[in-house]
Image (cartoon, rainbow, N blue to C red):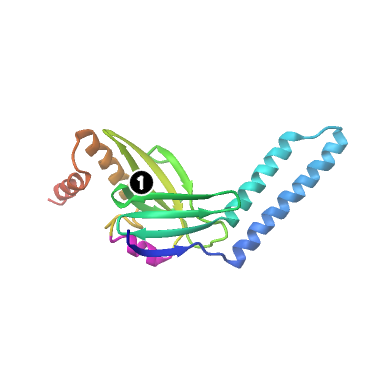
Amino acid sequence: MNILYSEQSQRTRSAELLVLLFVVLLIGAMIFTTFRSLNVGHLLLAEYFIELAALVVIVKQAVSRYTYTLTDTEFIIEENSFFRKRTFSVKYEDIDGIYAYNRDFLTNLRYRYKYRKCSTSDDRPIWFMVYSITKGKKVQYGRVMLKADDAFYETLEQFVPNRVRVPEADVIFYATVRADAAKQGIDVKDYYESLINSVEE
């Protein structure tokens, strides 16, 4: 396995201060809940649970560190946090594409897996990577949230040409073509190219 590119998640002061503000607000909310519990004479467990869960999620996303590695065969993400160390990997041929983050979560694809592999302390723009898991004639989709430098996307595009930092519609189209190719038992790249060529003609 040859490593062609590697980078780590970044921290910015402004993002860290914003996370700290949310943490202070949540701690304040927990103190307020404590006073309310004393007034009503019993613990408000539901409120405590929500506030504690939110605190854990925010802290985890802020302190977690990610290493993106591009090899000659696959994309690897190593996640390190207080809670655990995990590794995620996807082969280039399984990547359908990467498009810019948007708040419209309605899509034609149904994602079986959704992962956030970037830190809230990193103020670089968010991108969605869509990938497929093909099992025979069945295709399932996954989506990963990423933050990286331009050099990362430029290197990745060598293995996923014309599908990195493209419109969402292009990524969804390729993913849909992959599912259709799997049903027919044919190669997705050849099928995709034949469709594009037929449109151009």
Query: Residue 142: which quarter of the image?
Result: top left
Task: Mark 1: give few (<14), some (14-19) or many (20+) Cα within 10 Å.
Answer: many
Left or right placement of residue 76 versus residue 83 in this view: left
Q: Is residue 17 above or below residue 87?
A: below
Asked whether residue 151 is drawn in magenta, I would say yes
Q: Can you give x and y, in whole percent of width and height, for residue 80 in the image?
A: 54, 54
Q: How many marks?
A: 1
Of residues 200 and 134, the one drawn nearer to the viewer in this rendering = 134
Q: Can you give x and y, in whole percent of width and height, for residue 138 in the image?
A: 30, 33
Asked whether residue 59 is drawn in magenta, I would say no
Residue that appears at 81% across and 42% down: 34
Of residues 61 and 25, the one drawn nearer to the viewer in this rendering = 61
Of residues 9 and 74, the one drawn nearer to the viewer in this rendering = 74
* Residues in magenta, as a range: 149-158
Q: Is residue 96 visible?
A: yes
Left or right placement of residue 62 versus residue 52 in this view: left
- The residue where tag 1 is placed is 131
Query: Residue 106: which quarter of the image?
Result: top left
Q: Is residue 105 visible?
A: no
Q: Is residue 44 above or below residue 166?
A: above
Q: Quadrant of the N terminus?
A: bottom left
Residue lying furthest front: 1
Q: Can you give x and y, in whole percent of width and height, for residue 105 in the image?
A: 46, 43
Left or right placement of residue 115 versus residue 175 in this view: right
Residue that appears at 12% across and 50% down: 201
Left or right placement of residue 199 versus residue 13 in this view: left
Of residues 201 and 29, the one drawn nearer to the viewer in this rendering = 29
SS at circle 1: strand
Q: What kind of residue is marked 1?
A: Tyr
What secondary structure is the magenta-colored segment mainly? helix
Q: Can you give x and y, in whole percent of width and height, for residue 129 in the image?
A: 39, 51
